[in-house]
Image (tube, rainbow, N blue to C red):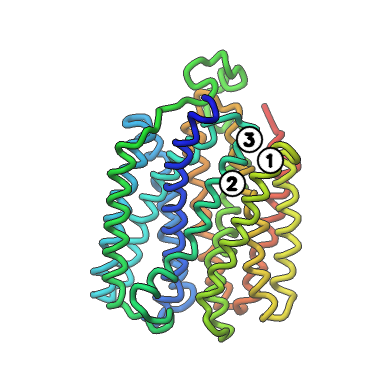
């Protein structure tokens, strides 16, 4: 497929990554929002993120079956209608002041997110040459990161109230607007010019002899280790992107909602560097190695620096995270042949790390305080560093 032929598909996929970022940003918004309005503990409020990302563990493989049955494009369209249902459920949850109903809405939103990512991640990876996949995913990442800070800014603008003054009953209007937009996006996607594409070796096994002799996903060590690296990455990435608002509020900093902008900017800056440098200046592997070193050093700075400096280190952590996902995904999915869709589902299931690690972080925050809770990041970044140097090369 020539470059001009996939510019239009990339534009549509970019819109979908924007939606993923917006939905993730809503999770970050609801953590301190529900903690304040429903008098929850930190561990309870982080169940919002856990409920959302639990869906990735439950529905990733069913999502691959949906793609096999109705194709990439219709699966993408279906996910938008699922988002509309989830956001609609937030309204009675607010009126009833029901935390379980909020968690159910978050789970449905996570299911929509799972279905969408099961389609768009492999699609953008195999849309062009595999050695430049990180570059394409970086472009998509910009769309994603630009949307992360929007929910808090959007809700504050629509309600005309500062974030700490927004109550449960103030969410109806912004949510109805969001529902209308995602429903419209579902219709647009259904008619979008997105071709059904195949990875190398999916149709002709001779094109990928390494995968042709395999009978199970578990016979691809680079995939399994990549899934593990992605599992811990998504968890610590969520801490980098979604906890800065809560941290700034706890420190009593003025206009804490403004801090939500900086993690997105950090991610965008890293993605721009990836677009410029990969694969012309550095490879996907080299980018991953550089990012892991930055993340390890910044994780230490978060827990050792004074709190007013530490909050900026949390925002900076997103820059270190930026090229990890774009690099891990193509390194893990390469040479899967006929197992490409199932392998993609395993990687999407790994996004469920976003459920467990923030939940552990919330419990640690109650136990040792907000700043010390960030110690949880260090061992996970070291694991990703192992994959960057050795794990991706393991073959059987």
| Disc with the residue nearer the chain's start (1 vs 3) | 3
Neighbours of disc 2 within 10 Å: few (<14), some (14-19), many (20+): many
- Residue 196, quarter of the rendered image: top left
Q: CA distance from mark 1 to mark 2?
A: 10 Å
* Residue matched to label 2: 138
- From the top left corner, tell me how far across and down residue 125 is, in percent: 54, 35
- From the top left corner, tell me how far across and down residue 292 is, in percent: 72, 53
Of helix, strand and loop, which one carries label 1? loop
Q: CA distance from mark 2 to mark 3?
A: 10 Å
Pointers 1 and 3 in contact (C-beta within 8 Å): yes
* Number of marks in the rendered image: 3
Pointers 1 and 2 in contact (C-beta within 8 Å): yes
* Residue matched to label 3: 132
| Disc with the residue nearer the chain's start (2 vs 3) | 3
Residue at image location 51% in from the left, 59% down from the top = 356
- 36 relative position to 70: left or right: right
- Residue 165, quarter of the rendered image: bottom left
């Amino acid at each position: 497929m020539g470059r001009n032929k996939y510019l239009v598909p990339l534009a549509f996929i970019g819109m979908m990554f924007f939606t993923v970022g917006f939905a993730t940003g809503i999770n970050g918004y609801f953590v301190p929002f529900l903690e304040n309005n429903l008098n929850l503990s930190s561990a309870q409020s982080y169940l919002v993120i856990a409920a959302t990302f639990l869906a990735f563990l439950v529905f990733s493989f069913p999502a691959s079956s949906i793609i096999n049955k109705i194709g990439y494009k219709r699966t993408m369209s279906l996910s938008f209608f699922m988002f509309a249902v989830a956001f609609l459920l937030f309204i009675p949850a607010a009126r009833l002041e029901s935390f379980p109903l909020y968690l159910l809405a978050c789970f449905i939103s996570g299911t929509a997110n799972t279905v969408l990512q099961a389609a768009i991640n492999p699609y953008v990876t195999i849309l062009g040459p595999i050695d430049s996949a990180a570059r394409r995913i970086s472009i998509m990442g910009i769309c994603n990161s630009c949307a992360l800070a929007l929910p808090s800014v959007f809700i504050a603008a629509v309600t005309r109230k500062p974030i700490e003054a927004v109550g449960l009953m103030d969410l109806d209007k912004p949510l109805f607007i969001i529902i209308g937009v995602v429903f419209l996006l579902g219709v647009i996607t259904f008619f979008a010019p997105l071709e059904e594409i195949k990875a190398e070796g999916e149709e002709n096994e001779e094109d990928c002899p390494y995968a042709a002799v395999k009978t199970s996903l578990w016979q691809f060590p680079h995939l399994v280790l990549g899934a593990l690296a992605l599992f811990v990455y998504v968890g610590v990435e969520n801490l980098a992107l979604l906890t800065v608002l809560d941290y700034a509020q706890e420190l009593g900093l003025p206009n804490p909602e403004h801090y939500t902008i900086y993690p997105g900017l950090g991610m965008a800056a890293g993605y721009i560097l990836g677009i410029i440098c990969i694969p012309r200046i550095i490879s996907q592997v080299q980018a991953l190695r550089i990012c892991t070193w930055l993340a390890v050093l910044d994780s230490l700075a978060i827990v050792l620096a004074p709190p007013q400096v530490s909050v900026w280190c949390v925002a900076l952590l997103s820059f270190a995270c930026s090229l990890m996902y774009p690099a891990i995904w193509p390194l893990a999915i390469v040479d899967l042949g006929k197992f490409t869709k199932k392998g993609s589902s395993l990687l999407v299931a790994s996004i469920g790390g976003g459920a467990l690690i923030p939940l552990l972080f919330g419990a640690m925050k109650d136990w040792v305080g907000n700043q010390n809770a960030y110690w949880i990041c260090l061992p996970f970044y070291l694991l990703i560093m192992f994959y960057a140097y050795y794990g991706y090369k393991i073959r059987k």
